[in-house]
Image (tube, helix red, strand yellow):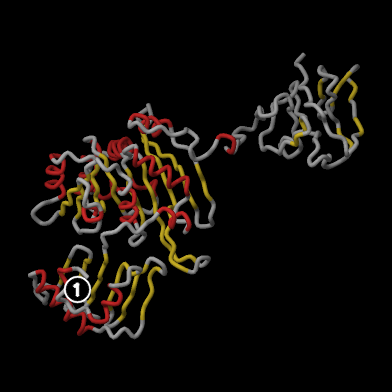
Amino acid sequence: MDTQFQQVDFGPLKQFLDNDDVTDISYSNGGQVWLKTLSKGVFRVENTGIDNTLIEKIAFQCANTMGKSFNMANPFLDAESAELRLNFVHDSIAKNGVALLMRKTPAKIRLKKDEIIKDDYIRLDIHDFLLKCVEGHCNILVSGETGSGKTEFIKYLASHTKENEKIITIEDTLELHLDRIFPHRDIVAMKTNNIASYSDVLVTCMRQNPRWILLSEVRSAEAVMAVRNSISSGHNILSTIHADKAASIPSRLYSLLESNLDLEQFLRSIHRYVQLGVHIKGYYSKERQKFHREIAEVTEFYVTEENEAKSNTLYKKTPDGKVTLHNPSKYLLGYLESQGVMIEPDILVKEEFKPQENTTNEYRVDTSVPNIPVVNSQNQIARPMVNNQIYQTSQIAPQPVNGRFVNNLTYPNNNQYSGQVQRAMYNAQMPNQKVNNIGQPMVNNNQPITTNVNPQQIYQQPVVQPNEQ
């Protein structure tokens, strides 16, 4: 328990305050107690022995500790300590009884690599990629709903910054506690209030010459301008914001401004200086039978040579579990390289596993097995055995042969031909043959040849593509 609230008698609430799994405690509606935990999410607890009388008693004790008043003239009370934040609403305003919300903000890094990988909080490749981006001083904004764990993830990323890089935290309510987590590091914790605004604190912050500026949350126009001014002046930033997905972070920042600033100009400035947006989703998983948090989206922001603001979804996981991956653009690769961090261009999607799509109505050449342009009726290459090795089917259709599509050929799969036994097929010894309108090979006097194929036959050498005549 915090020393600041040692004299406060929390009664039955203390059992929840001492439980590390509990993050939030809510009391409302004349006796209901709701908990938010890391493992189960939000749920109601019964028969707690907690009532309006106890909550009012705690409110008055906290008010005395903070040197404040809590009555009809002052119906709202905020009480804050190093690891606990309380908000009371007087029953003159909350007509169904005094209300209380307690949020625990412990000075610890709750996320650990092995655990979050095991719990499917984040994929290993995305985890390592994001830490590389932190090493390369990328500006990162984390979005998500209330209670999704945005601040915890920011703390985790901040814990991987270099030991000799100065950090300044700017908060209106204390949540990060990096100065207490890393007491040996050069960290300054600043708190805004009615006297010192975000703008005032930011001016002083710049004079402290930090490498990293951490805002616990961007929730006001002042905070948006603090973000913009920080990143445009060459400092690096980690912060959180409420948004429905990572791709909408720039537009969400603009909506908080509530100004007539040109939209396109603002978005370009954000896309130019904020490299990554990360979205965290928290929900009750029926499969796991507990509350589950996970990284649902990672989006890259950049501005093209044509001065257009663009985004690139590097990772996205849909509710049905489908995952989409894309490699970072040349802009992010170039930025990281300028910071002394080199990563492979195919760090997320290896070249050999990239899906190749036919984006036009024309056939495209598959170059992995040269000179074997054969396609079946489903526009799929049916590759032969080459040197006794079976090639897997590809979705890429080859180019026309002599201006005609070969649409009546298949090659063996698992040492056998599929479909009909009788196939029109290329003869490897006839390199100059053509095909007619129905895809049959033409030799001699332009007469079609149809060959009866032994189903057990396999090719010992690749078929040669006919030469153009």
Judging depth in this view, the residue of 396 and 108 nearest the camera is: 108
Instruction: Please say whether residue 1 is visible from this viewpoint.
Output: yes
Work out whether residue 226 or residue 96 is closer to the camera in this orientation and state it.
226
Q: In screen coordinates, is 454 left or right of 130?
A: right
Residue 37 falls in image quadrant: bottom left
Residue at 29%, 77% in the rendered image: 15
**Which residue carries the number 1 mark?**
89
In this picture, is 150 found above or below 41?
above
* Element type where label 1 sits in the image: strand
Q: How crowded is mark 1: few (under 14 residues within 10 Å), some or many (20 or more)?
A: many
Q: Residue at x 26, y 40 (%)?
A: 236
Q: Quadrant of the N terminus?
A: bottom left
Residue 251 visible in the shown view: no
Residue 378, how many percent across, how many down?
A: 73, 40
Based on the displayed image, in which of its 4 quarters is residue 210 positioned? top left
Q: Quadrant of the C terminus?
A: top right
Vertical arrangement, residue 39 with respect to residue 442, above or below: below
Q: Where does residue 397 sit, x and y in percent of width and height?
A: 69, 33
In the rendered structure, the answer to whether residue 369 lies left or right of residue 74 reads right
Q: Which residue lies furthest to the top in this view?
A: 469
Q: Residue 361 appears at what percent x and percent y?
A: 64, 32
User: What is the count of numbered marks?
Assistant: 1
Residue 178 vertical position relative to residue 331 in the rendered view, above or below:
below
Looking at numbered disc 1 in the image, what kind of residue is underneath it? Val
Q: Measured from the top left, where is residue 55 in percent x and y?
A: 21, 80
Q: In this view, does 10 lie to the left or right of 277?
A: left
